[in-house]
Each structure stands twice: as structure tokens, then as C-alpha cells.
Image (cartoon, rainbow, N blue to C red):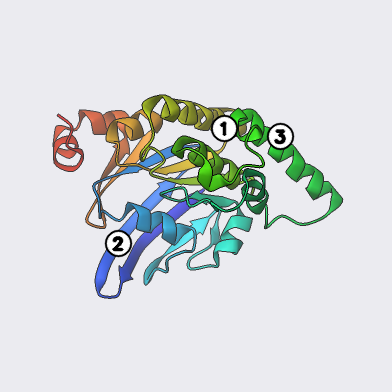
Amino acid sequence: MLECRSLDVAYGRLAALRNVSLTVRRGQIVSIVGGNGAGKTTLLRTISGLERSQRGNISFDGQDITNQDPAFIVRCGISHVPAGRQIFGNLTVMENLRLGAYVRTGTRAERAAVQQDLERAFELFPVLRRRTKQAGGSMSGGEQQMLAIARALMARPRLLLLDEPSLGLAPQILDGIFTVLLQLNRDDGLTILLVEQNAHLALDFASYAYVFETGSVAGEGHTQQLRDGDTVMKVYLGID
């Protein structure tokens, strides 16, 4: 579904990604793990059009989306849940959710489909139904993360990019969110690319993973293989 080939991304003279290649197959859950500054977030931002690559290409379902406008990429079927949630704190929960569907047309059939998707979001995250008129910024961190994911789902993506969803969340809340994500993958066939510093969580969640170090792919493989590879686990992930 997604192929990144030989990507180079730089901020001025600072190289953020160096010759990065990555593949995500349809229906797969793939994790990207590594320390701070490894280039994980930059990769997601480049896929979703928020950063530009200086070399290489990105294809989605066979279509070249390299350096395309973010709205175009959303229309192709990719939604991005950024690090830190980045919801619109002064807008209500309902307004945030409806903004997630901004690329969808205004036909009667599409409006009905958006309403169905709102109901699905409330089924997945019941707390949001009780908060529809509440400002997003006044909710807890866990509720904001649920809103950020639900907002991304309102675009009906086939590929969901998740950047550090565990950051600052209690384990119980995190378990509930990841249970929903697994349900979406299992029942809806949603493909997921996860960036996560919590290596245990990332490897438990995904079937395949890439290990990033200083902007490059330092290793990859099925998650069980990575668990069994002592050198990769100790050097790059700090797991004994």
C-alpha cells in the first residue's frame, strides 16, 4: 500500500532522513521505533505532505504522492494523528470531528455518510458523545487523544499514521485506545503505521517494525525477530 524509497529530508543543513526506504502492506500494522531525533516524526510528516523530501519518492496504492499537498494526500486515503494530539483546543469536540471530514464533498449522500461516521466515532470512543459541546482543550490528555484519532477517522482513511500516541497517557487509557485501533485493523482492514518510543508497546502492537537511528533505517523485521535479535534490541531499543 505504501512505499517510501531512498528518502532524504533535511532542515537546512541538518539531515533528518538519510536514504530511508520502507514498505507497508495493505491491512498490516507496522511500527517505527527509535530514540529521540531518530527521524521517526519527520518520516510521518513527509508522507503526509507536511515536510518535503529532497530525494526519493513516496507511493500510495501505486500513485506517486511525493511532496504533494496535505489535502491531496488526505483525499488519497491517508490520515495523520500528530504527536501531541494538536486538536483545536478552542473548538468543541463536534467541531473538531466535523473538521476531520473537511475534504469530503457536500452531496446529500456524503452528508449522510459523515453522520454515520460520527456515530461510529461515538461508538468507538463513547466519552466523546458526552463531550460534544465541550471545548477540546478542556478535556484530559486521554480524551484529547481519542478525539485526535476520531477526527482522523472522519476522513475515512485506508492508512492511519500515528505519532507517539502513548505520550503522557496512563496505561489503562492507553490499553483502551490500542484495543480500538486493533479492532479497526481487524474489522475494517485499516492499515496502521505507528511511530512510538515505547518499544515494548510498539512491538506488541505491530507485526513488523523498522528501527531508526539518526535518520536512517538501522534494522527491520517481524517483531518477534527483532525481539530475538539481542544486538538490535540492546543497542537501539535499550531492552535487555
The numbered mark, 2 or 3, whose residue comes first in the sequence reads 2
Which circle marks residue 85 in the picture? Answer: none
- State the residue position of label 1: 184
Left or right of 176: which side holds 6?
left
Q: Quadrant of residue 235?
A: top left
* Residue 179 visible to an observer of this rendering: yes
Residue 114, position as x, y percentages in the image: 74, 45
- State the residue position of label 2: 19
Which circle marks residue 119 in the picture? Answer: 3
Q: Secondary structure at mark 3?
A: helix
Mark 2 → mark 3, Cα distance in angstroms: 42 Å
Residue at the location (86% across, 50% down)? 108
Q: Is residue 164 above or below residue 229?
A: below
The numbered mark, 2 or 1, whose residue comes first in the sequence reads 2
The front one of 116 and 16 is 116
Q: In the orientation shown, which residue stands out farthest toward the right? A: 108
The front one of 166 and 218 is 166
* Residue 26 visible to an observer of this rendering: no
Residue at the location (38% across, 30% down)? 170
Mark 3 → mark 1, Cα distance in angstroms: 15 Å
Bin the neighbour count of mark 1 within 10 Å (Cα to Cα): few under 14, some 14-19, many 20 and up.
Answer: some
Indicate which label's residue lies in the foreground, 3 or 1. Answer: 3
Mark 2 → mark 1, Cα distance in angstroms: 32 Å
Indicate which label's residue lies in the foreground, 2 or 3. Answer: 3
Q: Are marks 2 and 3 in contact (CB under 8 Å)?
A: no
The front one of 64 and 140 is 140
> Which quadrant of the figure contains the C terminus?
top left
